[in-house]
Image (tube, coloured by chain):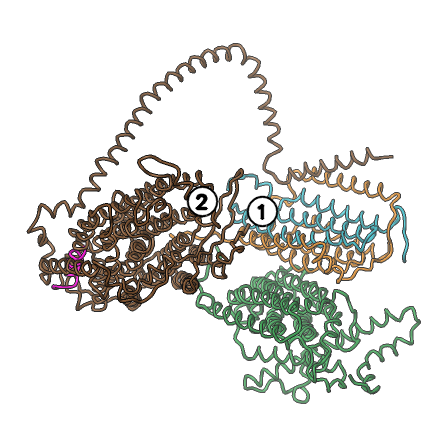
Amino acid sequence: MTGVTMGINSPLAGYLLVAALLFAIGLAGALVRRNAILVLIGIELMLNAANLNLIAFWRYGPHPEALTGMMFAIFSIAVAAAEAAVGLGLVIAIHRHTDTTDLDKMNRMKG
Amino acid sequence: MATSPLFTELDQIFIILRDWLVGFLPAALRPAAGVVLCVIIIVCLFPGLFALTTVFERKGLGRIQNRLGPNRVGPFGFFQPIADGIKSLTKEDIVPFSANAVVHFLAPLSLVVAVFMEFAVLPMGRNMVLVDMDAGLLFFFAMSASTELSVFMAGWSSRNKYSLLGAMRAVAQMISYEVVLLLSSVAVVMITGSLSLSTIVAAQNSYTGIFPHWYIFTPWGLAGFVMYAIAATAETNRSPFDLPEGESELVAGYHTEYSGFKFALFFLGEYLAMFAISGLGTTLFLGGWSAPLSFLTFIPSWIWFFSKVMLSIFVFIWMRGTLPRLRQDQLMNFAWKFCLPFTLLDLMVTALWRFMGEGWLRWVVSTAILALAYVLMGRMGMRKEHFGPRRYRYAE
Amino acid sequence: MQESGAFTPQFATSAITGILWLIPVAPMVASGVIALLKQPRRKLAAGLAIGSLSISLLLSLVAFCHVVAGWAHGSVIREFVNFTWFRFGSSTVDLGWVLDPLASIMLVMVSFVGLLIFIYSVGYMAHDENFTRFFCFLSLFAGAMLGVVISNSLLLLFMCWEIVGLTSYLLIGFWYQKPSAAAAAKKAFVTTRVGDVFFLLGIVWLFSQTGTLLFYNHGVGSLEGLALVNLLSQHAGLGLSAAGAIGLLIFAGAVGKSGQLPLHVWLPDAMEGPTPVSALIHAATMVAAGVYLVARVYPLMQIGAAPGGTTTALTVVTWVGASTAVFAALIAVAQNDIKRILAYSTISQLGYMMAGLGLGGVAVGMFHLITHAFFKALLFLGAGSVIHGCHEEQDIRRMGGLKSDMPLTFVTYAIGMLALCGFPIFFSGFWSKDGILEAAQHWDLSKGPFYLLVFGALLTAFYMTRQVCYVFFGHWRGHGSAHESPKVMTLPLAILAFFAIALGVIGTPAWPWFHAFLSNRAASFDLHGFAEPGLGLLMLGSSCVVFAGLGLGWWLYGNKSPKPEAPDALEKSAPWLWKPLRDRLYIDEFYGVTVIAFYGWWARVADWLDRRVWGGIVAVIAWLFGLWARLNRFLDVDWVDGGFDKTCEEISSGGGLLSRVEGGRVQNYLRILAAAVVALVAILLWSSRP
Amino acid sequence: MNLVFYLLAALTIGGGLAAVLLKHLVHCALATTVAFAGLAMLFLQLDAQFAGFAQILVYIGAVAILIVFAILLTRGSELPKDGVFSRSWFVGLVIAAGVFAVLGWAVLESMRALPQQTAVPAVTVHDIGIALVGRYVLPLEIVALLLTAATIGAVIVAMHEKERPR
């Protein structure tokens, strides 16, 4: 199992492509959907794609024992949790205020 | 330690059996086959245990409520679960018209699968753990956290306001108490320095004189265990924390719209969760499969594990028979205003314990801190505004 | 930088000096915590305040015992801890605290009396809505006062002094919804500020001369030999050395705080505050702060005096004190508000203290301060108890006969009153006042202060008798019925009463323990102290004066209980005397027509200047600019704008185009962001192609 | 690159697609959960046990629940009247496709000659713990602070404004 592989057929490329695709899907979700919650879901997917990148680089990078990518991913998960909490809290607050979660209708700064 | 080979063989009888059975297969398949065998055993064993428990529960509750309980099917009504099983298998599976059929179908399934997964990391005896994972405890909690979503799926897909309300309550309650559950377990992790459940048990498997080094016999461990027990009761939606299924107010909570085999799956899931969480509690605080007194080690380890689990189950049943149900706000207040701070304090005390080193002083200090905090917070919690009559704010 | 005097054994700091800062800090911290409490947490607030002050008292007692022990072993205890607050250029501003006999005795007095008043307040303020706020201020006040006592730096002292001023403002105006209380608070604040300006000038002068504001610092402090000799050698005019002049400036601050003659007007008005505040301000702390300050900087004033002689500065102090003593006593004779009488009596007694300082030195003045603190606190708390019992009635004409309704209050009040009058032998006031009189008698410069003070003693006895007759004798003239106050209020009274009697013991001529303690001599019990020439005569004389005052008072007012509306007995016999006294000798009015009128006039002048002169100039300039502007406009509109307007229109339409991007649609932003990322990555990749 | 990877990748991508495309918000949320689970299993595939379990615990146990709660609280479970896609959805789609294109390009471009470790890293949970409270203790503390702040912030933001006394 030990050793080094090179090139496009390495597993890393596969993970990175999956991550890129997931990122694009998340971005598409954030861009095309009306609902603010769906946009948040899209952003979560993007974050997850980034995490997958980090973990993949950690796994196939030169110094996995340094744990850098892993730590990044763990902290990113923690931060994403906070982000989700605040984001959804905001959505709920806005919904209470304007009675909509439609981003197309949410373009005023004034309450 | 039981030195006699007979006792050792008895202790390891399941391992020996497995190796013997797997031995018939080619060497390449042996590890996989061993795992599959264990999975099959778990999947068969615990539902069996579940069947037994239902009888015990009903009879025990009957005893507590001064009545007989089931006594018609088989000797002393012991075949009652078989009858129940046949009944639920043959009943019509009703899916409400407006229900979301796919989610409605997936909910009980995902629940039971997730709960079954929890057993994978529980050491049920010496060397008797399916996967000795490095992050076993985390795995356990990850799996138990996934059950919440199943509950929500069940409640939401039924298209029934009682179901939805019950599911929301259940999820809110499970999330709140999961924090307490996790944090009270972290105390054990702090002392053991490992998330692996078998390591945790091994750390408790030694004796001073005849007394074991179980974590429940330390101040922080006792406090942690009490918190764990409370949170576990709530996490499994058992009485007195069974609001999500409060029959009197919500019909039956999130499984109102389930019938037949799916209902049985929920029922199974609930009891399996109970077993799993009791098993984890046993592992964390009650020394897992280790014997309670040093001269009892000749009795096979798995007997100890299962008797401890069954003892916990008995306590669950006992509480159900004795305690009245809490109100939703009391439940939440209790979780966030008493359990959580107290558990955090317990963590701090554990750290203190860890760093004070051997000696009687740490016993005194941690006991004092915890007792004081318990009394103070208890007094604060019992103030009128928390448990008194409540003004309701109705939905807009 | 912690610089403690560890290198000479005499200055070695002890453990208690090291933690001396805790004494003021404990109540201050409590105050901070109380400030965060909600209104209903009354018990907690009171508990915090009382608890913290108890800690202070405990530490003060330890400090006191430490000093006494050192003194008993014959060594001078003067321990201090100094540290640098900040430095600018080559000079440093140092702060520090000191423990010496003066500070230790003040600490014990302030924290003890303060504690009793705190306890009393629990009862007195029990029904007040802003109970927690009250204790917050009270704690801050006590903390700041204790800070004044222990500071070893004039600057730290000044800071605490100002906090004292601030909290006194807050406390006097505690019931700020009463306009009179708000006005009184303002008056107190502004009037004391006048003194404080001089005080600050003194500080600055001292700093510029000596380069340090520390009192004691291993011989280089501002109150120690080198600096004093330096200050003495400079002349400030009017026959004053720089030391004396600075001392007088600082004394001006004390005049403001202690309500001495020209600046006394705020003190009677301060009675608008709750009674415990009056007790705290007028007995133990704020007013004593002035006297304590003078005692603290005494070396500044005293330096240059021949043995047994005096200096200009001390002469000024003496005369101010003596005249205040008589002046305030005179006004007190004709007041009808129970607290106002006490306030004037306080001013008068402070005059005694100042005179004592000027005539006889630190010990004489401070002894009167200590005894006065106890019996005046007693009187104020007693008055509070009376007011409380009479349903917030303060007019003594509407009381009467309370000696049977409020027996405990009566007994304690009577003790306080006799102590204040200087009733012979048994009461502390007698010994402390006699000390001052004796010093006055031996003053070489003039006998004036002596006569003034004797007259003041007579008046004191007279007006106190009048008050007690009105309040406790005769029959009840108010509304409803009076009732005795609760235990939490009477207990402090009893304790204070005990001390009002017992404290005299430590300052009798036979056993001048107090004086010895403060001046670092050994004290011995020696009955021959009484045999000093003239002393017996003096004691006899002053007793006679006191008896005369008591008798006169009783003769005029005893047991008569006149109608509230009826004219006063003194008014009937000497209306020409009564009226000016009742109207407080027109000092307020005098200030009204002089100082305040002057400021009003000055403000009007400034206003006129503003409107007419400066306004006119500004108008002319504005007109000129207007002219210039018109010229400019002509140029602009007809010459420049042609091209400029077009540009502006272009820019604004471009802005309109861009503003579509910022339409408040989150997804648009995200879209642009993502498109930019695409472009960026594409460029990067393209450019990095091999 | 084995079968398991392809299956998991398909599961994840499928979950993600469903999350973005499904009409019903709750379905979207559940599909997101599938994507989360697939990702967690990809993490396990990458020998990152701890991260994988943390992913399940945090995303399925908490974030997904939060999302469904938010959906129910904002009445998002009812279908909107005027379509689920925003007005200029096509632009968004094009941009997302562009992002995928450049990312994929970048991946393929950089993979050409990159040496890669294939040995399974010998990292235990214990190592992670040591790293967390050792080298990464400051980020850990900051994240703790952030989570506290976020908790408080979320509570305040979503809290009912106090009804004014009438």
Stretch in magenta: C460-474
**Helix, strand or loop for the magenta stretch, by majority:** helix
Q: Residues within 10 Å of mark 1 (few under 14, many from 20)?
A: many
Residue D106 lies left or right of residue C600; in this view the side is right
In the picture of the structure, the residue carrying the numbered disc 1 is A101
Note the chain letter of the green one: B
Residue at 73% over, 87% down? B295
Q: Quadrant of residue B281?
A: bottom right
- Residue D124 visible? The answer is yes
The chain containing the residue under callout 1 comes to A
> Is residue A96 shown above or below B217?
above
Note the chain letter of the orange one: D
Q: Colour of chain A?
A: cyan
Residue at 58% over, 74% down? B364
Q: Amino acid at mark 1?
A: Thr
Residue at 72% over, 65% down? B139
Instruction: Name the foreground residue: C160 vs D108.
Output: C160
In the picture of the structure, the residue carrying the numbered disc 2 is C226
> Is residue C347 shown above or below C509?
above
Instruction: Name the foreground residue: A20 vs B192.
Output: B192
